[in-house]
Amino acid sequence: MAPVRELTVGQVAMRSGVAVSALHFYEARGLIRSHRTAGNQRRYSRDVLRRVAIIRVAQEVGISLAEIAAAFQSLPEGRTPTREDWNLLSTAWRDGLDHKISQLKKLRDGLTDCIGCGCMSIDKCPLRNKEDRLAREGTGARRLLVP
Amino acid sequence: MAPVRELTVGQVAMRSGVAVSALHFYEARGLIRSHRTAGNQRRYSRDVLRRVAIIRVAQEVGISLAEIAAAFQSLPEGRTPTREDWNLLSTAWRDGLDHKISQLKKLRDGLTDCIGCGCMSIDKCPLRNKEDRLAREGTGARRLLVP
DNA sequence: GCTTGACCTCAAGTTAGGTTGAGCTTGTAG
DNA sequence: CTACAAGCTCAACCTAACTTGAGGTCAAGC
């Protein structure tokens, strides 16, 4: 059987469903890595597919590329990450995810309660958190927080 | 006791925790409404605070302003929304929120399983959905979907 | 009556996350 | 060996969601 072949950008794009330009972009942001052939073309090892899959899912739930990149720092540099490595990553995200899930549930179930409760002065409404988590973190577009 | 006083932008900004410029912006986007004094200054009725609170919470979970605006279309034009009105709104969002919640749970609980399972060909991985929900909806920044 | 702070408008700038296009190089199939 | 698809780089463009700044108005206190 064929040895573990390396992938071209096009192949990664096909299999992961993201555009080549996005892969270039992720690489520039340090989310994925490649090495080059003699002819300066990118080659990826197979685990890039896992990374990309995680990137997409994480993004879909509102985690920024910067945060994903930060989380990926915990992954090993040289070798292909093991199941354990990935597990650590999801554990690191757990608190943020838990918070997000509870916010979503509140929005889903409790919108009316909270909205109707007359407690709209920000510092008291349970929907809003006293820590002012929405405080700016620089200018520009406001990002979702999963600290 | 004082009658129901109208609020100035500054007051709304203070009480809601969002910048005056953001309130202008929301108004331009049709998310909130005001009328003007003789001197061309904005005055808001109290229920703007509820709207703003919802906007912030909805944003925090990844709903775009456009989607929020669309949902707000269901609110009554002339009168202050009742608890029932708000309830309808959250009901309308329920499916999207349910989906998001399940995605988050998968990410939280199942990252390792899925990542480790070797099923990384997109069309088969349970973390990814076959409907290609990530398909582009125009160019530019990719938005979270809560359809 | 004047000053001070809150408002107003409108244009331009910013960040995130990519896409698009031009111009040039690689690699593979016929 | 020659097409021609795939790659490469780099700069420019795009949307969302705001902020910043310039230049001018309004209103309440002293």
Image (spheres, coloured by chain):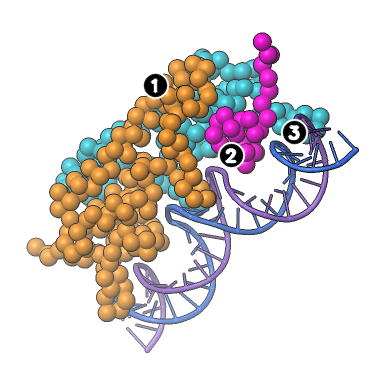
Chain colours: A cyan, B orange, C purple, D blue
Q: Is residue B73 above or below residue A119?
A: below
Q: Which residue is painted at 26% across and 70% down in the image?
A: B35
Q: Amino acid at mark 3?
A: Gln
Q: Which residue is painted at 51% across and 48% down in the image?
A: B141
Q: Residues within 10 Å of mark 1 (few under 14, many from 20)?
A: some
Q: Under tag 3, what secondary structure?
A: loop
The disc placed on residue A19 is: 2
Viewer-proximal residue among B92 and A90: B92
Q: Amino acid at mark 1?
A: Asp
Question: In this orientation, does residue A125 appear?
Answer: no
Q: Amino acid at mark 2?
A: Ala
For marks 2 and 3 on the same chain, the one whose residue lies earlier in the sequence: 2
Residue D1 at x, y percent in the picture: 90, 38
Residue B90 at x, y percent in the picture: 24, 44
Viewer-proximal residue among B79 and B37: B79
The residue to which callout 1 is attached is B109
Q: Which residues are magenta?
A: A1-30
The residue to which callout 3 is attached is A41
Q: Is residue B121 above or below residue A111?
A: above
Q: CA distance from mark 2 to mark 3?
A: 16 Å
